[in-house]
Image (cartoon, rainbow, N blue to C red):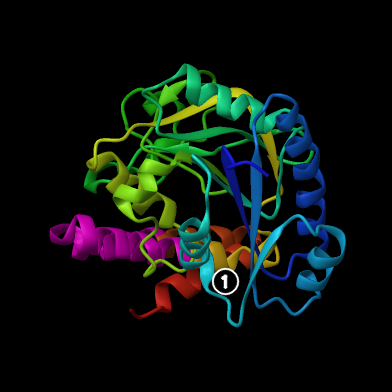
């Protein structure tokens, strides 16, 4: 094979069937890209799964470059390991529960070639039923973190007044735009971005790590774009066994790490805001009988770091 234009990187952790589907769809996109003279390689980091994922990948997808880790390295370290070995001009970080379309690689590469200002790219995400899924937002700061934690950014009238970290309004994702960050479920970047920033901060095990990297990426002078011109299906939370608790707890932990690194003077205020907002949500979800979400916020309140 010639030098690849794209290195697709997939992390696998106890998602055998979903990883199988991901690689099956990738194989179709890979073949379609080859018709357009776009060569690609696929690297899978197998993060010590106990469900036979490694054996399945070896048997069904011999063209995959399989890297087997003896421990679960987490999202940040696993992707860094793969990017260090990747040969492409572009890196596509793809969750094992993200399903590309046949033309995804072609459209993504073409976007970069038509938009020289774009250094990192995210695309439209949908849930398996085809409904809209948020896939990026603005970088966290003291002001918009407060509006996010207190639920202000969910109020429609505030749409043009706040800089949303986690925009839920579909209008935000209706057109091409420069953004603060895009989700690691589908994050494509030029090799130069990795070479200059050296990838994820490995202190972030999982959740918020793409936000932190995006902060350093933009500080380094690169631009991050979102486009709705092509889409990917993202199942979501597969490696967390679809639990409510793990993502919420880890996101709050990640936000504290983000502030400790980039806004240390506001870390105390952030911790207080997280405690207050989590208590309010605990009470609300408890009254509504949503035990899983109530438990998640209880864990955030009682967690000591």
Span colored in magenta: 250-277
Depth check, front residue: 268 or 16: 16
* Magenta-span inclusion, residue 259: yes
Depth check, front residue: 62 or 152: 62
Depth check, front residue: 149 or 9: 9
Is 295 drawn above or below residue 27 in the view shown?
below
Seen from this angle, which residue lies furthest left? 265
**Dominant secondary structure (helix, strand or loop) of the stretch shown in magenta:** helix
Q: Position of residue 168 (x, y in %)?
A: 52, 35
Secondary structure, mark 1, is helix
User: Would you identify the image quadrant in which residue 251 lies?
Assistant: bottom left
Residue at point 31%, 44% (across, down): 217
Q: Position of residue 246 (x, y in %)?
A: 56, 68
Residue at point 59%, 63% (across, down): 293
Depth check, front residue: 229 or 284: 229
Q: Is residue 44 left or right of residue 174?
A: right
Q: Quadrant of the N terminus?
A: top right
Residue at point 66%, 78% (across, down): 48
Q: Which residue is disc 1 drawn over? A: 295
């Amino acid at each position: 094979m010639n030098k690849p234009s794209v290195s697709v990187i997939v992390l696998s952790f106890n998602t055998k069937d979903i990883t199988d589907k991901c690689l099956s769809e990738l194989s179709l996109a890979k073949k379609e890209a080859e018709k357009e003279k776009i060569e690609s390689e696929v690297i899978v980091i197998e993060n010590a799964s106990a469900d036979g994922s490694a054996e399945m990948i070896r048997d069904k997808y011999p063209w995959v470059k399989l890297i087997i880790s003896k421990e679960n390295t987490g999202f940040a370290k696993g992707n860094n390991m793969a990017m260090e070995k990747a040969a492409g001009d572009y890196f596509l970080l793809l969750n094992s529960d993200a399903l590309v379309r046949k033309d995804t690689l072609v459209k993504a590469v073409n976007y970069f070639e038509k938009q020289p200002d774009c250094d990192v790219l995210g695309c439209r995400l949908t849930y398996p039923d085809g409904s809209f899924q948020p896939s990026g937002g603005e970088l966290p700061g003291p002001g918009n973190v407060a509006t996010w934690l207190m639920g202000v950014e969910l109020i429609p009238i505030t749409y043009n007044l706040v800089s949303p970290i986690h925009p839920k309004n579909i209008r935000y994702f209706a057109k091409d735009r420069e953004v603060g960050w895009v989700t690691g479920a589908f994050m494509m970047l030029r090799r130069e971005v990795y070479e200059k920033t050296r990838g994820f901060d490995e202190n972030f095990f999982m959740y918020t790590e793409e936000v932190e990297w995006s902060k350093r990426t933009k500080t380094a002078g690169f631009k991050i774009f979102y486009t709705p011109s092509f889409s990917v299906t993202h199942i979501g939370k597969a490696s967390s066994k679809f639990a409510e608790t793990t993502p919420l707890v880890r996101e709050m932990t990640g936000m504290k790490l983000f502030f400790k690194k980039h806004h240390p003077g506001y870390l105390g205020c952030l911790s207080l805001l997280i405690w207050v907002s989590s208590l309010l949500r605990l009470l609300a979800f408890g009254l509504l009988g949503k035990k899983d979400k109530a438990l998640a916020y209880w864990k955030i309140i009682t967690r000591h770091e």
